């Protein structure tokens, strides 16, 4: 991850100082590769760092920040273009942000991989013995025979933590130098295409991100030229709408999904069912595609920009409000492959975003905004309907996971 951030930083500096269009194009292609490597690690870090009853809330933060980039980017770009008038400064600002992220990762994001030995220092208690040893300790204190342990005053604990932090942050101890396995990692994500929950998650995620890209392109085409003649600053400020939708979706895709999982977990402690989070998808499955319809009809009369913003916020709501629930469900179904799921997800959404950005304007000019956005809504609703079989056949999917993965 740190190497990817260093590469991403260097490429953003290159983009800001690119002497020609071809140089800028190559830098952005390489920048997308470096940025994609970083994005794909999110599900793995969440799965390794947080307990399962907090996964949806943790994952929604990852998804929210990931999607917020597509909203904050146009806002900052519009402000830079309006205030500075030099596109290079946008790339320089990105380079500064990446540098801050790199420093934060160096000092505050140690390796999250768990090992069986735990931290060096006091022996870790095995899970099976935890309750019995805790009960024995409690009985000792109740009888007066136990002595409350005093914290060491020689700084040994802080020394142990410092060594562990250095070991996890600045060494290759947790990196398996298996080049054969590294080559296989390029094809491992493709194996997951056969899994229904992964396919549905990537489709919903990819289409929602793709439609967001289409909207950003179309709004610039509609509002910047005559007769509206909006400035780049005002066009960029329209992106506050999806940012608002993402924020509204946070408690739905996070707290509500975890509440459903925790309630089921308390009732059926012996049965782990990742699919119990899926009912939380219903809200976003209804609201997000409907946002496309609101947008399409709103763009027929562009001066009603409030309607356009409401539709865009509704669409973006689906990323944190429902797509995040699907991502949490997919990762919980196969935690050991969380990194592969993240890779497949990011490749799909970025490929769709790249493709639709070329066809969006010609599609609008040929079909009109109402027809175009109605088609987008229909495709997104179709993908959400695929969640129903995931719920109906959830037991069969669990058996499939156990047998093949």
Image (cartoon, rainbow, N blue to C red):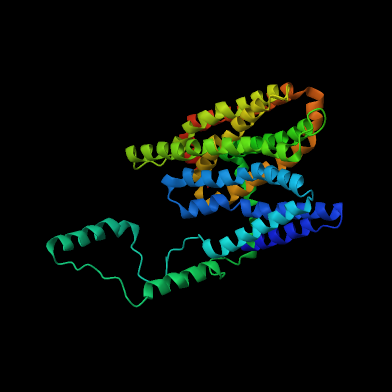
| Residue at the outermost front position | 83
Q: Does the rendering let one see residue 46?
A: yes
Quarter residue 193 falls in: top right
Q: Is residue 17 left or right of residue 1?
A: right
Q: Does the rendering let one see residue 186?
A: no
Residue at the image point whose x is 49% and y is 54% from the top: 48
Quarter residue 262 falls in: top left
Q: How many marks?
A: 0
The residue lying toward the viewer, choosing from 144 and 18, is 18
| Residue at the outermost bottom position | 154
Q: Is residue 110 above or below residue 63?
A: below
Residue at the image point whose x is 75% and y is 55% from the top: 30
Q: Is residue 274 above or below residue 167?
A: above
Q: Position of residue 167 (x, y in %)?
A: 51, 70
Residue at the image point whose x is 37% and y is 37% from the top: 264
Q: Position of residue 57 (x, y in %)?
A: 47, 44
Q: Is residue 242 left or right of residue 253?
A: right
Q: Is residue 155 above or below residue 309?
A: below
Q: Is residue 1 left or right of residue 389?
A: right
Q: Position of residue 146 (x, y in %)?
A: 18, 66
Q: Is residue 363 above or below residue 138?
A: above
Q: Position of residue 284 (x, y in %)?
A: 54, 31
The residue lying toward the viewer, choosing from 121 and 6, is 6
Position of the N terminus, as image quadrant, is bottom right
């Amino acid at each position: 991850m740190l190497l990817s951030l260093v590469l991403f930083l260097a490429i953003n500096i290159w983009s800001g100082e690119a002497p020609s269009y071809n140089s800028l194009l190559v830098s952005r292609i390489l920048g997308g590769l470096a940025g994609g490597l970083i994005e794909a690690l999110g599900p793995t870090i969440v799965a390794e760092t947080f307990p399962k009853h907090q996964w949806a809330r943790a994952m929604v933060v990852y998804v929210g920040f990931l999607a917020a980039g597509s909203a904050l980017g146009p806002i900052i770009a519009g402000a830079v273009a309006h205030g500075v008038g030099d596109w290079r400064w946008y790339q320089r600002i990105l380079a500064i942000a990446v540098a801050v992220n790199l420093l934060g990762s160096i000092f505050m994001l140690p390796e999250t991989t768990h090992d069986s030995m735990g931290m060096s220092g006091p022996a870790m208690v095995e899970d099976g013995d935890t309750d019995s040893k805790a009960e024995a300790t409690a009985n000792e204190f109740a009888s007066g025979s136990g002595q409350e342990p005093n914290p060491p005053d020689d700084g040994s604990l802080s020394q142990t933590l410092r060594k562990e932090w250095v070991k996890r942050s600045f060494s290759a101890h947790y990196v398996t130098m298996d080049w054969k396995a590294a080559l296989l990692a390029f094809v491992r994500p493709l194996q997951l295409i056969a899994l229904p929950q992964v396919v549905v998650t990537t489709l919903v995620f990819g289409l929602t991100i793709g439609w967001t890209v289409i909207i950003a392109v179309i709004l610039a085409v509609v509002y910047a030229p005559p007769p509206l003649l909006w400035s780049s600053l005002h066009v960029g400020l329209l992106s506050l709408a999806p940012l608002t939708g993402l924020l509204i979706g946070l408690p739905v895709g996070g707290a509500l999904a975890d509440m459903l999982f925790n309630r089921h977990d308390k009732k059926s402690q012996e049965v782990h069912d990742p699919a119990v989070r899926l009912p939380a998808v219903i809200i976003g499955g209804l609201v997000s595609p409907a946002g496309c319809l609101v947008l399409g009809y709103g763009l027929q009369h562009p001066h009603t920009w409030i309607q356009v913003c409401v539709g865009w916020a509704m669409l973006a709501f689906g990323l944190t409000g429902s797509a995040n629930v699907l991502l949490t469900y997919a990762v919980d179904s196969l935690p050991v492959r969380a990194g592969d799921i993240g890779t497949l997800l990011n490749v799909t959404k970025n490929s769709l975003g790249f493709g639709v950005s070329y066809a969006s304007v010609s599609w609008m000019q040929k079909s009109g905004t109402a027809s175009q956005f109605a088609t987008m809504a229909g495709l997104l609703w179709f993908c959400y309907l695929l969640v129903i079989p995931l719920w109906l056949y959830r037991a069969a999917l669990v058996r499939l996971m156990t047998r093949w993965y």
